[in-house]
Image (cartoon, coloured by chain):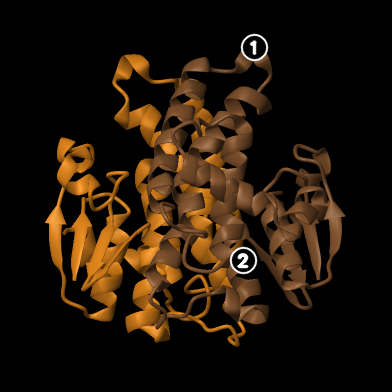
Chain colours: A orange, B brown
């Protein structure tokens, strides 16, 4: 398997899951913003020039949550609650919570605080994004009351939405009112598979 | 089944799919931006005050793509390619393409052209969002070459990412270079199940 990767990107989720499953993989490394991500060679593989892309034999697949569902279904069904599981709906909801709720304000916050040159940044939008991010984390904080992982035992949802929670904290979201979420992020960051992906 | 719904929202996806499956449902209606969506009664059901929320017996689930996967797995497995299907990865990638790629620029465009009062709108961000939206649609246009639906026969991915394509066109994205995508949107809009959801 081959993963098109950049440190600090959603590709960390893919490598984390591969480490959890114990699959070997080769990395093709970029750094975020690197020109080659938009170059002709990579955009033939992923027209949007984003990472991760996973190549597994004849299969090429992008979108980190899709990759997580693909890898889980093919190689680690124990990390995916099935339709008859009591926590099936919970698992699905929180798997999708990252891209549906947490990442949109993160995307905007990163654009306005890191990606744009200082003279083009908009402080109002950065502040609005951070406020929205904190609000979306509030629902996750309430959900994590009494829970170790998002949906019963560790699932692929933890490598996706758990990653979004970790990124939120690193970007400076307000965790002072989120003890459950802070403990959850600590728990995830302590996993060997996460550490391997985080330092890849 | 009960669907918390607002016209013009992602809740159209849920009603569309229920119509495709032929399931009966009750609607609890809001209009987007209505105060009651943030009120104490609804935020007990969905803390973020968003729609759709689906209630199916004892199960309450939010996030439109999660709901699509839930309904498909429970009631319409013929609309979900399984792990052994040739188009499994394609199906997953394009199911997730809506929230991963198309909706983030749509969200920002709608904020800057519709939701904010005119004096607070930022034309530069609106223009940047529309440009990004057109670029993400470009990859979908290329994918739809020679295809009727996103992944083989009609799947739940069409009710999610297909809906995002329809919304993009209605918001004024540039379809002049996207004949495949325009034909695809026409095809979806002609379905009775879509029409029922679109006029709900």
Q: Is residue B46 visible?
A: no
Q: On residue B68, which mark appears?
A: 2
Q: Residue at x 62, y 23 (%)?
A: B113
Disc 2 to disc 1, C-alpha distance: 38 Å
In-image side of A23 versus A181 (left or right): left
Give the total number of marks visible in the rendering: 2
| Residue at left offset 20%, top offset 42% | A37
- Identify the mark at residue A25; answer none if there is no mark: none
Q: Position of residue A130 (x, y in %)?
A: 49, 36
Q: Residue at x 51, y 51 (%)?
A: B98
Judging by the rendered image, the residue that carries numbered circle 1 is B119
Disc 2 secondary structure class = helix
Along the line of sight, which residue is nearer the eye, A7 or A66?
Answer: A66
From the top left corner, tell me how far across and down residue A138 is, in percent: 58, 52
Indicate the position of residue B60 as horizontal and vertical percent values.
Answer: 71, 69
Quadrant of the frame with the N terminus of chain B: bottom right
Crowd band around label 2 with a 10 angstrom C-alpha radius: few (<14), some (14–19), many (20+): many
From the viewer's side, name the closer residue of A10 and B196. Answer: B196
Residue located farthest toward the front when viewing the structure as drawn: B146
Q: Position of residue B59 (x, y in %)?
A: 72, 75
Chain name for mark 1: B
Establish if B109 lies above or below B162.
above
Query: Which of marks 1 and 2 precedes in the sequence?
Result: 2
Q: Secondary structure at mark 1?
A: helix
Residue A96 in view, yes or no: yes
């Amino acid at each position: 398997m081959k993963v098109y990767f950049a440190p600090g990107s959603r590709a960390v989720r893919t490598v984390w899951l591969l480490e959890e499953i114990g699959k070997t993989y080769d990395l093709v490394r970029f750094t975020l913003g690197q020109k080659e991500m938009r170059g002709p060679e990579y955009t033939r593989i992923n027209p949007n020039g984003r990472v991760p892309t996973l190549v597994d034999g004849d299969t090429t697949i992008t979108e980190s949550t899709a990759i997580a569902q693909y890898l889980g279904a093919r190689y680690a069904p124990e990390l995916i609650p099935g339709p008859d599981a009591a926590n099936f709906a919970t698992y699905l909801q929180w798997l999708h919570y990252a891209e549906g709720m947490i990442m949109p304000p993160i995307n905007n916050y990163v654009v306005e605080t890191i990606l744009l040159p200082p003279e083009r940044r908009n402080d109002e939008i950065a502040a609005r994004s951070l406020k929205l991010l904190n609000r979306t984390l509030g629902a996750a904080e309430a959900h994590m009351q009494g829970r170790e992982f998002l949906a019963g035992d560790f699932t692929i949802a933890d490598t996706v939405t758990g990653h979004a929670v970790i990124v939120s904290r690193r970007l400076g979201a307000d965790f002072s009112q989120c003890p459950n979420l802070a403990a959850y992020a600590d728990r995830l960051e302590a996993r060997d598979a996460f550490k391997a992906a985080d330092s890849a």
